[in-house]
Image (cartoon, rainbow, N blue to C red):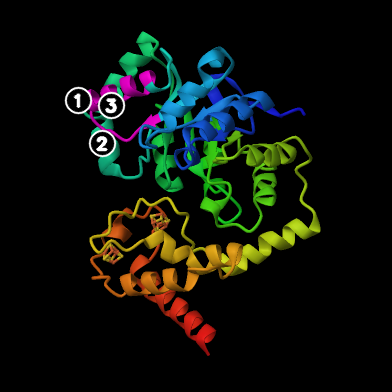
């Protein structure tokens, strides 16, 4: 099957538009992780994204792709903002990925003016990374952000060759300013969260929708199983026009999920009360819709409700949520709603 190719902005590298997101391979065994990455290579995927922050993901990707390093592009990222720290992380990434260069090294989740000032100030990560570009341990510099408005401001400064951003049929804000700007400035676009962090009812439709978007250079769905690689492959190698049925699925998700839906990124953690925020926020619209009532679901929901009731409304979670979700309000609403569901089942 033939995968469409695009040039990733001014990096000049030619990427298949169907890429690989490395978060989920943390959650399976090492053997399964290696199998899934090797399957990706077999089907022709050539862009692999991981991060220092994704625990064992880099290491597993490194093991899987060791013999084919020259055939793939490796992208990783660091959330460190200081020169010394970012170089320490780069060296760990190089070791983990079993390589002596990173194709696209990204500053991870740059979403505030304060962080950006730190990065580009004296002793900041940027000066060290420019030295690494000269040295060749990094081939291209990118940035990732969950805030398209802020990312647009950063992109205007001309430092980064790629930007990675969440973009999907319920998160269309990037196409207002950021993505047209990237096109104008020839900045490569890497699209994360095409499935809304697992919130959408049909992954095939969600991927097709994104591959039909002109502004998306490479879309990187996270995958942990070989069957997911193959299912996405059949979408990625087919037409991108949406059928009436697919359009109605999208509309249904728009109505059901609205804009206040949790993408399961867990940036809101840690919660001092140890509330499993993303599980609670997604329990009804995602877990229940997908899997229905199963043995243990009622007990699990009862535990979630009990935990939710301990929220002290400190607001720490809201400061960290990149989607600015009103978590304190949602915690109460979701717990109330789950409680009503449990009562209805007892009646
Ligand atoms: S507001 Fe509630 S849910 Fe959020 S961090 Fe504080 S205690 Fe946890
Ligand atoms: S509440 Fe926000 S930060 Fe927390 S998991 Fe959901 S989207 Fe991410």
Is 258 part of what is drawn in magenta? Answer: no
10 Å crowding of disc 2: few (<14), some (14-19), many (20+) = few
Find disc 3 in the rendering and name its residue: 86
The residue singled out by tag 1 in the image is: 123
162 on left or right of 5: left
Quarter of the image for the N terminus: give it: top right
Please check the rendered image and state whether residue 84 is part of the magenta-colored stretch, yes or no.
yes
Confirm or deny contact between disc 3 and disc 2 (CB under 8 A).
no
Residue 252, x across and y down, in percent: 66, 66
Identify the image quadrant of residue 90: top left
Span of residues in magenta: 77-95
Instruction: Determine if residue 187 is in view.
Output: no
The numbered dot on residue 73 is: none
Sort mark 1 into few (<14), some (14-19) or many (20+) by Cα contacts within 10 Å.
some
Q: Position of residue 76 (x, y in %)?
A: 43, 28
Residue 235 horizontal/vertical position (percent): 73, 41
From the viewer's perspective, is residue 83 above or below residue 18? above
Vertical order, 130 against 195 (above or below):
above
The residue furthest bottom is 347
């Amino acid at each position: 099957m033939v995968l469409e190719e695009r040039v990733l902005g001014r990096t000049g590298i030619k990427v298949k538009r169907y890429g690989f997101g490395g978060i989920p391979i943390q959650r399976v065994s090492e053997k399964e992780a290696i199998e899934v990455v090797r399957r990706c290579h077999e089907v022709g995927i050539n862009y692999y994204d991981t991060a220092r922050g994704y625990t064992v993901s880099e290491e597993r990707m490194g093991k899987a792709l060791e013999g084919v390093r020259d055939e793939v592009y490796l992208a990783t990222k660091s959330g460190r903002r200081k020169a010394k720290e970012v170089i320490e992380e780069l060296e760990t990434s190089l070791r983990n990925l079993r390589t002596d260069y990173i194709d696209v090294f990204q500053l991870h989740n740059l979403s505030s003016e304060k962080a950006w000032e730190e990065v580009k100030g004296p002793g900041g990560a940027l000066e060290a990374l420019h030295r690494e570009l000269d040295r060749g341990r990094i081939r291209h510099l990118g940035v990732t952000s969950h805030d398209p408005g802020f990312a647009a401001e950063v992109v205007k400064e001309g430092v980064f060759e790629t930007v990675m951003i969440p973009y999907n049929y319920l998160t269309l804000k990037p196409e207002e300013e950021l993505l047209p700007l990237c096109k104008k400035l020839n900045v490569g676009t890497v699209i994360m969260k095409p499935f809304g962090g697992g919130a959408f009812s049909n992954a095939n439709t969600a991927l097709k929708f994104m591959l039909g978007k002109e502004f998306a250079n490479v879309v990187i769905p996270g995958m942990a199983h070989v069957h997911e690689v193959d299912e996405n492959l059949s979408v990625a190698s087919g037409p991108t026009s949406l059928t009436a049925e697919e359009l109605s699925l999208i509309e249904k998700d728009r109505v059901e999920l609205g804009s206040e839906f949790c993408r399961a990124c867990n940036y809101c953690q840690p919660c001092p009360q140890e509330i499993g925020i993303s599980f609670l926020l997604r329990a009804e619209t995602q877990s229940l819709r997908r899997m229905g009532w199963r043995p243990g679901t009622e007990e699990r929901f009862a535990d979630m409700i009990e935990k939710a009731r301990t929220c002290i409304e400190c607001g720490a979670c809201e400061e960290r949520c990149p989607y600015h979700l009103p978590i304190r309000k949602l915690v109460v609403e979701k717990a109330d709603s789950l409680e009503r569901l449990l009562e209805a089942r007892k009646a």
